[in-house]
Amino acid sequence: MTVHEEYLKTIKKFDKSWKVVHENRLPLLKEIMSWLENPDKQLKIIHIAGTNGKGSTGEMLNEVLIAQGYNVGHFSSPAVYTNREQILYNDEQITEADFLKYFQKIYKIIQKHGKKLTDVSYFEWWTLVGLVYFADKKADFVILEVGLGGQQDATNVISNALLTIFTKISYDHQQILGDSLSKITAIKADIIKKGATVISYNGQLSEVKQILQAKATKVGATWYAGKSPVITTLSSAPTGTKVRINGEYELFLGLAGQYQVLNLNTALQAVDALRTLGYQISQRAIIQGLSVANLPGRMEYDAKHNILRDAAHNPDGISALLAAMHAWKLPFKPTVILGILRDKNYLAMIEDLLPQVDRIIAVTPANPSRALSADELAAQILEMDTNVEVAVADDPTAAITLARQIRESSETMIIITGSFYTLRAVKGIEF
């Protein structure tokens, strides 16, 4: 059996269910971590939670720290095109061979303690492998992004953090996290650890900020008291955003979308906090790192084919996408390949999107248990707005074929959005 075949066979066996509603998960994971000699205690961890912006903020910090010369582990989810995107070391995905090596090391240890492979869920396996891998690599920093919520999330197995960062907190996963912003925030706030410096998104709602601050005080963490940088947008395009920082210097941010300026604000506060803690980060590293920041499936622009892939998966994500489109002053309303999960607030997403697009090609995201079917999506769109042209694509190849036909008679931008699983569905299909 080849390494690739063994890798695919292994991850296929993982329990794919989310365990964040099970209160017994963290005690189990903490026990496993003790059997592994607590790799998290060897690491300087930057823990990031929030509803939107975790990936962007994490990527900005990742690139700045790498540009400074640090060795950086980066754990993020969900993966868009390949599962190994979740574990990066200096921007390189963990290899299939290394994943198997660390998985087998952990598996042998949990077997000795009477546990089975399926006693650990999919996301928990990736979290454990990532932490052991980064510790073995002796990473200078580890950027660890929460998967879902915070309190019962597998990443909350860590016992300490250098920084705890909260990106924008809003409504999402209400069926799991609660139906009020205060409940959602309290669950996310539970990742705050004693001794950490806590940084919050600059536009955080006051009730959210108060809950975070109260939790920080309660556990003995330090609330970041530095100044928020003044960021002026100079120009915005699908390729990225040019900004001026504090009126002192200019830089190009490789992540497109005006909302990224707010995430940049958070990232720069984190840089300042690290400097305060004694870590060297130069202005050159900030400029160089941010210029190459990029994320699979987040404002990912293909200039050759004028295609934008953006996994806007909730109302906030769609609003941010629409704001970016407005800033770019597109000559034509775009054609959108859209696939949405039924457990999202898809009515609000569709309502915001419809006035801003010319036509929608409905697809079914690559998640059978959660997907809103292409037929259901198309029917909902037609019920809400009969002026938008709607087509149903039976499969991802058909969606691209339809978009290609439209392109033949128009220079309109093609946008693929609605979910990470939508992007995954059209993965690898040439335009």
Image (cartoon, grey):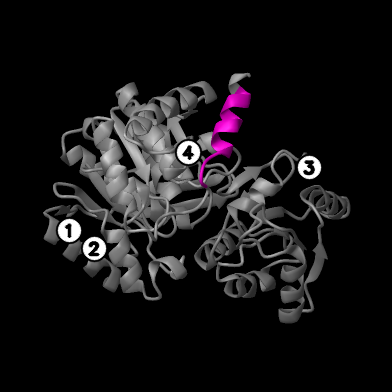
Identity of the amino acid at label 3? Phe
Residue 333 magenta-highlighted: no
Q: Are marks 1 and 2 in contact (CB under 8 Å)?
A: yes
313 sits left or right of 39 in the view: right
Q: Identify the residue at horizontal 79%, vertical 52% (top origin).
A: 395
Q: Identify the residue at horizontal 44%, vertical 70% (top origin).
A: 174
Label 1 Cα neighbours within 10 Å, binned few <14 / some 14-19 / many ≥20? many
Q: Which residue is mark 3?
A: 431
Q: Nearer the viewer, mark 3 or mark 2?
A: 2
Disc number for residue 86: 4
Q: Which x, y percent locates residue 292?
A: 48, 35
Cα distance between the residues tagged 3 and 1: 49 Å
Cα distance between the residues tagged 1 and 2: 6 Å
Q: Nearer the viewer, mark 4 or mark 3?
A: 4
Cα distance between the residues tagged 4 and 3: 26 Å
371 sits left or right of 97 in the view: right
Disc number for residue 216: 1
Q: Which x, y percent locates residue 359?
A: 77, 65
Q: Which x, y percent locates residue 358?
A: 76, 66
Compare marks 4 and 3 and give the one earlier in the sequence. 4
Identity of the amino acid at label 1? Ala
Q: Which residue is mark 2?
A: 212
Report the span colored magenta. Answer: 4-15
Compare marks 3 and 2 and give the one earlier in the sequence. 2
Identity of the amino acid at label 2? Leu
Which residue is nearer to you in this view: 228 or 27? 27
Which residue is nearer to you in this view: 9 or 279? 9
Compare marks 2 and 4 and give the one earlier in the sequence. 4
Q: Quadrant of the C terminus?
A: top right
